[in-house]
Amino acid sequence: MPTKRTLNNLEERLLAPYAAKAALSRGRKYPEKEHSYRSCYQRDRDRIIHSAAFRRLEYKTQVFVNHEGDYYRTRLTHTIEVAQIARTIAAALKLNPDLTEAIALAHDLGHTPFGHAGEEALNELMKASGGFNHNLQGLRTVDLLEDRYPDFPGLNLSWEVREGIVKHSSAFDTAVKIGELAPGEAPTMETQVVDVADEIAYDNHDLDDGLASGLIKEEDLKALPIWHRIADKTSPKSKPLPAGIRRYMIIRALIDIQVTDLIRQTQENISAAGIKSLAQVKKADKKIVSFGKNMLNLRVPLREFLLCKLYRHYRVVRMSVKAKRFIKELFEAYAENPRQLPSETQGRIDKEGVRRAVCDYIAGMTDRYALDEYKKLFDPYQKV
């Protein structure tokens, strides 16, 4: 059986000097005895996977609402895909794969039902009460809302995982400054890897879902240099591939060239900046994990295409508008009469205030639970 000393020795031998090592963690908010054969980051990963918030991601929207079909990504499958890509990148860069995986698995725990439409609705409703940010909500989830242990609230995750949650940033994610989590420091490289793995996953898998749904047509993609470059190499002239297999092969190749470019460019960045320690990473004035200039230029038209052709497609917009209406009416009904809330949520009102308690309750809902609650509150023939 491996021991704690064995794990620490493995980290020293296998990880780069600028990786975040478990033996040097800044610890937990509530001190706990360390596990005999799991590092703190391995325990964090396991706690996240076993949490109720993680399970609920199965029925939270990525792009397509759950009842649209079983094929499409949910927030859970997206999270698993991010973790897989991030762990691959971390291993290639000799970063801490356990910390990377834990941050990746936790990065969307604060997401609302109905994807970013739900977040926008809650942010508007909470404007006078601090607003809503899903990174901050993710921290609230792991620090406060998960109720699993007798001696402390939340999951009591390590400092580095909690920092990774609030400093996660991408085109759809805004980092949050929290005093106790060193807002003036740059994120670990493990956090930076998750940021880019998230972008790679949702760009390419949303593209895959868009093609499968028929909202995007392949002929529309031929004008994109990155698609054209891969599609030509993926289609053998002698034996045409079935459409589904061909699409899978192209998406797989798109992910591969982006991951490969990211690893190569990041290694160059590390060398150019002379990064030799975690302390240097934390003091860096820009992110070290990045694509090369050419890949960045190739990705811009792809992302603009997804924004225009998928995220602003009238069917997606209709569902987003409808979702915001559901969230607004649920919120107002609960806030007007909090006795409609479950007893455990009512019990938090004195400390958190009505609006924040309602916000936490709605943010934790799955798509289908929110729809069921809407029927119970507004359909006179629905059993409550």
Image (tube, helix red, strand yellow):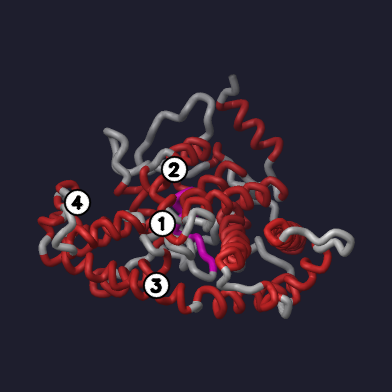
Q: Amino acid at mark 3?
A: Ser
Which numbered circle lies on residue 48? 2
The answer to whether 210 appears left or right of 48 in the picture is right
Residue that mark 3 sits on: 320
Q: Nearer the viewer, mark 3 or mark 4?
A: 3
The residue wearing badge 4 is: 345
Q: Contact, CB < 8 Å: mark 3 with mark 4?
A: no
The CA distance from mark 2 to mark 3 is 28 Å
Q: Which mark is residue 60?
A: 1
Specify the segment rendered in magenta: 161-170
Q: In the drawing, does residue 277 fall left or right of residue 383?
A: right
Q: CA distance from mark 3 to mark 4?
A: 27 Å
Q: Viewed as shown, does residue 85 lie left or right of 331?
A: right
> Which element type, helix, strand or loop, lies under badge 2?
helix
Q: Nearer the viewer, residue 237 or 346?
A: 237
Give how far apart the Cα atoms at labels 4 and 2 are: 22 Å
Q: Quadrant of residue 325?
A: bottom left
> In the rendered structure, which amino acid carries the disc numbered 1?
Lys
Instruction: Classify mark 4: helix, strand or loop.
Output: helix
* Residue neighbourhood size for the residue with mark 3, other residues' Cα within 10 Å, grouped as few (<14), some (14–19), many (≥20): many
- Which of marks 2 and 4 precedes in the sequence? 2
Q: CA distance from mark 1 to mark 4?
A: 21 Å
Q: Quadrant of residue 362?
A: bottom left
Q: Residue drawn at (19%, 58%), measured in percent from left and top?
A: 376
The residue at the point 50 percent across, 24 percent down is: 36
Query: What number is the disc on residue 244?
Result: none
